[in-house]
Amino acid sequence: MLYSTINLRLPLFIVTGNPGSGKTTAIMRLVDLLKQKGLNVGGVFSREIRKDGVRMGFEFVDVNSNDRALLADVHGNGPKVGKYSVNIEGCRFAVNVLRKTMMEADVIVCDELGPMEFKSKEFVDCVNEMLDSNKKIVVVVHKRLKHPVIDRCKEKASFMIELTIQNRNKVPRILLDGMAG
C-alpha cells in the first residue's frame, strides 16, 4: 500500500517505510513547508549518530530549538533493542518537547514511533495523550512494529503513506495538501 485515505475526520497523518527510505528527511521538509505557511509546528525527530561512517546510535532533536538528547547508543546500559541501549532520560527529553508542543503548536511532529522509543512507558503514555488531543499530528511509524499504540494510530489515522525511494520527494507536498483539506 503506497497510501490510503482512511478517515478524513481526524487530523492524524502516518508516514511509514523501510529503513533508509528517507522518512525523516521527508518530515523535515514537511515541517519547513508548514512553517512557510505560518503554522506553529513542534515535536521531535530521531536521527542517526554516526562516527567514521558507522552508526553508533540515535538522538532526538527538537524541531524548533535543535536541542538534542541521546535516544540510544551501542555503549549504553539501558534496555536493549538489538545492539543499542535505550537512554530512558533521552526519551524523557522527547516527552517534554511533545507535551510542550501539545500546548503550544498547531501541528505536532513525532519521528519516530519505534521499538526504542517504546521502551519508555512515559513516551508511550505521551503518545496516547497526543492521540487524544485535537491537534494535527504527523507520526513516523516503524514499518514492521506491532504495538497497541501503533494499532491505535492506524485506527485514528486520517491518512497513511508508505514512503519509497520513488515517492519520497513528493511525500511532503502530499502531506501538506492532505492537511489543508
Image: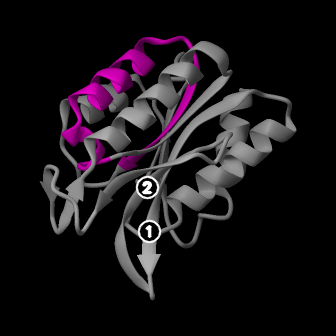
Camera-nearest residue between 12 and 89: 89
Q: From which residue to which does the magenta span run?
A: 114-141
Kind of residue at badge 2? Glu
Residue at the far bottom in the pictured view? 52
Of 4 and 82, nearer the camera is: 82
Graded by Cα atoms within 10 Å as few (under 14), some (14 to 19) or many (20 or more), the crowding at tag 1 reads: some
Magenta run includes residue 139: yes
Q: Is residue 66 above or below residue 48?
A: above
Would residue 114 appear left or right of 173 to someone viewing this image? left
Secondary structure of the residue carrying numbered label 1: strand
Write the residue at 28% across / 26% down. 122
Residue 169: horizontal and vertical position, in percent? Answer: 67, 64
Identify the element where label 2 is drawn: strand
User: What residue is disc 1 on?
Assistant: 49
How far apart are the two marked residues, 1 and 2, measured between alpha carbons?
7 Å
Q: Which residue is mark 2?
A: 59
- In the image: residue 164, left or right of residue 72: right
Residue 28, position in %: x, y?
64, 52
Cβ–Cβ below 8 Å for labels 1 and 2? yes
Answer whether residue 119 is magenta in the image.
yes
Residue 15 appears at what percent x and percent y?
Answer: 48, 47
